[in-house]
Image (cartoon, coloured by chain):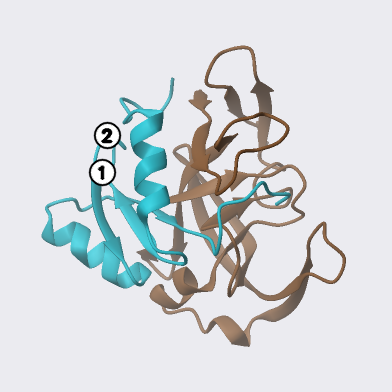
Chain colours: A cyan, B brown
Amino acid sequence: MGEGRMMSTEERIRILREAKPNSWIAFSNDESRFIAYGESYAAVVKAAELAGENEPVIVKTPDQWSSRVF
Amino acid sequence: MIYPYRAFPLDQTDPVTKLDFAWRPALKVLIWYNHKRTAPIESIVDTGADHCIFDAELGEALGIPVTKGDRCQLLGFAKGASAMGFVHKVALTVAAHRIETRVVFAYGIASTGILGQHGFFDHFTVTFDWTPDPPCFDLRRIPRN
């Protein structure tokens, strides 16, 4: 696979589910660890840098988690 | 290069799959503008999207005057649902390949980023494979002269 050792599916789902709607999440660059939640992109990147992760993978949460047609 | 699908939670169990999460193809993308770039942004690979679309906050973080871009109305599957996007020329780094393209920045979208036909699928051959668990997809750059 192309993107290294990732956290378990269950752990990723839990982290995404526990985030506030329309918030931002930082994972470690290899996606093995949760790093931070943030109210904005700038805030979550800053929080990741403070945690020592300079290349976090960023995900924004939607209003609701539902089946989607993108 | 082969990439695994990512799991996304669902608030309610999907009546089709009977799962409380959905598998979606996603990639990490860097967005570049005037020598600044974003952190890696998890973006959904979406064959049904005409364009690459990103949350407007990412454009603002790069110093892009988002609302000054050409306007692009975005319509979804559901009748009446729409959002206004703004077009800007950026560079994307996808799977270690750099692509210069026009993308749409939009406020209030339900995804961090979407990789669509123009700017992504016109640069890569993508093969989706639900044989393994989790599903995966193969990404190959289209050679250009």
Identify the element where label 1 is drawn. Answer: loop
Residue farthest along the bottom direction in this orientation: B68
Q: Disc 2 vs disc 1: Cβ atoms closer than 8 Å?
A: yes
How packed mark 2 is, by other alpha carbons closer than 10 Å (few <14, some 14-19, many 20 or more), is: some
- Quarter holding the C terminus of chain B is top right
Identify the element where label 2 is drawn. Answer: loop
Whether residue B39 appears in this view of the structure is no
Image coords of residue A32 (percent x, y): 27, 34
Examine the rendered structure and indicate whether residue B75 appears above or below residue B26: below
Residue denoted by label 2? A32
| Nearer-the-camera pick, A19 or B111 | A19
Please indicate whether residue B46 sits to the left or right of residue A4 in the image.
right
Residue plotted at (46% across, 67% down): A22
Image coords of residue B106 (percent x, y): 61, 72
Residue plotted at (37% across, 38% down): A12
Examine the rendered structure and indicate whether residue B128 appears above or below residue B47: above
Residue A28's mark? 1
Q: Chain of mark 1?
A: A
Residue plotted at (65% across, 63% down): B102
Whether residue B37 appears in this view of the structure is yes
How packed mark 1 is, by other alpha carbons closer than 10 Å (few <14, some 14-19, many 20 or more), is: many
Image coords of residue B82 (percent x, y): 77, 72
Please indicate whether residue B102 sits to the left or right of residue B56 in the image.
right
Image coords of residue B20 (percent x, y): 55, 37
| Nearer-the-camera pick, B61 or A48 | A48
Examine the rendered structure and indicate whether residue A33 appears above or below residue A8: below
Callout 2, which amino acid? Ser
In which image quadrant can residue A45 be found? bottom left
Residue B90's mark? none
